[in-house]
Amino acid sequence: MRLADLLGVEFRFAWPLRGQVPQDTTHAIVPAEEFFSADFLAAYQVEPEVASTGFVPPKGRGIDLDALRAQIEAADRGLLAPGSPLANHIDPKAVPEVARGFSKEFARIGFHRQIEEAISAAREIPLDPATVGIHLRAGDHMYGRFRLLNRFWDKTVPAPIARELIMRSRADGSPVIVFGQDAELITELCETTGAVDAATMRPTSLGDRSADAMFDLVLMSRCERILCGDSGFAVQAAAISDKQPEFHVDLITPEESLEITRSDLERNGDRYHPVQRAFAWWVAYYRVRHDIPYDEAAVMLGAAIEGDPDNPRSRLRLAALSYREGDVVRGDEVLTDALIADVAPGRDRLRSVIEFSRMRGRRSDSHEIVEDFERAAEAGSGPASLYRAAIRARLGEVESALADAATFKKHAAAEPRLAGLAGFDALVEATMEDRLGEFKS
């Protein structure tokens, strides 16, 4: 809507772009006719297949409106609005409008009656002008498969940091409302800090998760300050009220984060779900990872593994640090543990190997440890050779990948813990075929 206004053209939208509404318990997305008014849909909605042909995304960063107009004129049908902030694509110095909030656009959307009722209910809640909203996030990034991908680590506020932010806000005299998906954690934090659970403020008559989510979004938008991780939900709440979100990584330094985490987990760790404890240790480690010695890092990563043993992230990092220290035996033991954890009912691939081969992007951080695996493989490590094989297969280096896989198979045949695993050989083969297949596709 903003982009169309800036360019003087009409806007249309598809819901969702690929035509599939997620069916899971961590999202509150419903079919368009259950979220928007019939008039709004009739005026602006197009089918996903229409939106996927003839529309092009903006090219280049820091461009101005003249450049965008040229691009839209050259496109067959029009410009595809980017899925990231406009200020990432249009120079905010040249076009200041791309940096302001979206309260006016939000007011123009025609919502379904049930969603409008949720918005009205959120706006009628009495709030102290100094109220602080803190959005914790959880869902798929905490308990689903996305927790395996480190690129999302900063979207969720760890439990110890949440407690600290609440206590600081309360000490300043501000009421605090806590938003998020982990009801158990939110109840614990509110009962022990005096904060208020947003769920207790919702009318019971709203109807479904999408209405509940909209209530939370609008109520959060009314808070004077919005403290959060880099989560789209909290960012959107700030945007519809023309505010700026305040990210926990900017409010608390890495060194503070480590001390807060240690102290809080010592006092309150048994009150948190094990995965919450694991995540807290991981974030504390990750933020100071370049400034702590190996022994200290190993303790923190070990605590993260204990809390979430099915998550390969901490094991991959601990193995890499062991290799970096020259302790190939210890690194191999850690990777063997990861491979054993991968062999679970219903699995058709080695999860830790797949995730390692994927996590090479800037935000995924495996580029920091891939050289450690490389050196270990060169030194004859069987486990490190398998992980390197997956990367090589994904890059299309077929002969090198197969050679690494062969090195690992010899190692596995002589490793009692691996040789006796039922179905392990088949998982190794399926994993390599998967990586080679991804390259071919």
Image (cartoon, rainbow, N blue to C red):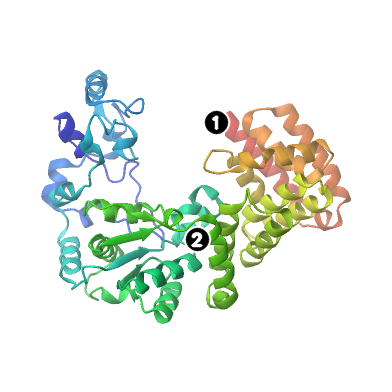
Residue occupied by mark 1: 441
Along the line of sight, the residue nearer the viewer: 280 or 138: 280
Which dot marks residue 316?
A: none
Circle count: 2
Report the residue at 67% width, 50% height from top: 317
In the rendered view, does 131 fall on the left or right side of 313?
A: left
Task: Check the image and name the residue furthest to the left.
Answer: 39
Q: Amino acid at mark 1?
A: Ser
Q: Which numbered disc covers residue 142?
A: 2
Residue 127 sits in quarter: bottom left
Taking 108 as reference, is 432 left or right?
Answer: right
Quarter of the image that includes the N terminus: top left
Residue 224 can be seen in this image: yes
Query: Can the viewer see residue 198 in this picture?
Result: no
**Depth order, front residue of 176/135:** 176
Residue at the image position 32 percent from the left and 56 percent from the top: 29
Q: Amino acid at mark 2?
A: Met
- Observer-nearest residue: 241 or 34? 241
Q: Is residue 194 left or right of residue 297?
A: left
Q: Earlier in the sequence, mark 2 or mark 1?
A: 2
Q: Is residue 349 left or right of residue 127?
A: right
Describe the element under mark 2 as helix, strand or loop: helix
Between label 2 and label 1, give the one nearer the viewer: 2
Find residue 354 and report its image quarter.
top right
Q: Residue furthest front?
A: 172
**Position of 408 relative to 317 (above/below):** above
Q: CA distance from mark 2 to mark 1?
A: 30 Å
Q: Where does the image place residue 191, in percent across and percent down from the top left? A: 41, 81
Depth check, front residue: 143 or 101: 101
The quadrant in which the C terminus is found is top right
